[in-house]
Amino acid sequence: MSIPKEFLRASYTYHLPKHLIASHPIKPKEEAKLMIYERARNRLTHTTFAHIFEFFPKNALIVLNDTKVIKARLFGRKKSGHLVEILIHHPKDNFCLVQIRGKVHVGLILQLDHGYFCQVLEVLSNGMRLVGFFKESGHFLEWVEVLDMLEILGHMPIPPYLKRADEIKDLQDYQSVFAKNLGAIAAPTASLHFSESTKAYLLSHFKHAFLTLHVGAGTFLGVECEDIREHGMHSEFVDIPLITQQALDHAPCILCIGTTALRAVEHYKRGFKTPHCDLFLHAGNPVKHVQALLTNFHLPQSTLIMLVASMLGLDKCLELYKQAIKHHYRFYSYGDGMLIL
């Protein structure tokens, strides 16, 4: 039996010229391009972020993700002197789940700078490693102490498709002006379009609410199974304060700044009580409770483009991506944006 095209991974493919992958953000932020698509009128508008508030529905509750990116990338050395990259995901039972490039074994100790060490405690079948961090002759660090260590040793975990090392300016560029709660290892990129001045305008002129979804490395993972319905979604920590829950319960219109905010809202509105969100939104499980979305242009065959297509329809989504390429929009984390109404 053939797979309907909406569930076929290959359907979410498009060709993107390499020069349209944004390696750095536009400055000032208000000059980034913004595509507006009004679904009810089938109307497309090309503008810039300087005009974004002209298109926000007046009755909308603007929902923002206040997660803060940690400096999650580290480098250590084996006894041989070989340099190893470590990407921290999140704490687990007083230790840390990480990715380590290359082969490692239980008991391996990697030497970091400033007297820190990393010991491999378990090698998991999914490619993750459970590790403990410590200083010489000391105890394994608690998560708060790991965060302190990362401030000293860590690098910003900019997306791998940028194909460059992180730079000093990424400390600011890859951090949202709404960032508050440490824990993400990827930025909620739609929020990166806001400057301090546009943040101030939004908060003073629109009803708004904050939640926290700590974006994980899975946000960059493509769907590998041919039928997207078989994809196992990564899980991310989510916290929705009571005041935000109450606002969501009474909002006539919800506009989410980014796919992470949208997934968190759908998680709550569907009655899930767990603090871990693994909701995969696609054509067979479409967005139900959010009326508008500000988002970037996403990687082919990613869960993010599938989420967007669940709001637009597959054919319309691919049509708009073609329009974005035609009009030289910049793609991915540091790229331009689209407002779906």
Image: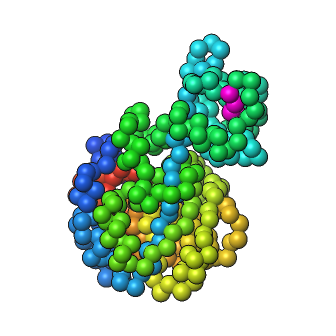
Q: Is residue 325 visible?
A: no
**Front-most of residues 64 and 297:** 64
Taking 130 as reference, is 281 left or right? left
**Residue 206 x %, y %:** 38, 78
Q: Quadrant of the C terminus?
A: bottom left
**Which picture quadrant has residue 31?**
bottom left
- What span is in magenta? 131-135
Query: Which residue shows up at 43% across the image and 67% down it?
Result: 257
**Residue 209 x %, y %:** 49, 73
Taking 95 as reference, is 321 left or right? left
Q: Quadrant of the N terminus?
A: bottom right
Taking 255 as reference, is 38 left or right? left
Query: Which residue shows up at 60% across the image and 42% down it?
Result: 147
**Residue 208 x %, y %:** 45, 75
Asked whether 273 falls inside the magenta stretch, the response is no
State the colouring used for the structure image.
rainbow
**Front-most of residues 304 and 52:** 52
**Residue 45 x %, y %:** 25, 71
Query: Which residue shows up at 50% across the image and 63% down it?
Result: 65
- Residue furthest out toward the top: 80
**Front-most of residues 286 and 58:** 58
Magenta highlight: main SS: strand
Q: Is residue 277 visible?
A: yes
**Front-most of residues 218 and 318:** 218
**Which picture quadrant has residue 294?**
bottom left
Asked whether 132 falls inside the magenta stretch, the response is yes
Compared with 278, 244 (above or below) is below
Query: Which residue shows up at 41% across the image and 43% down it?
Result: 171
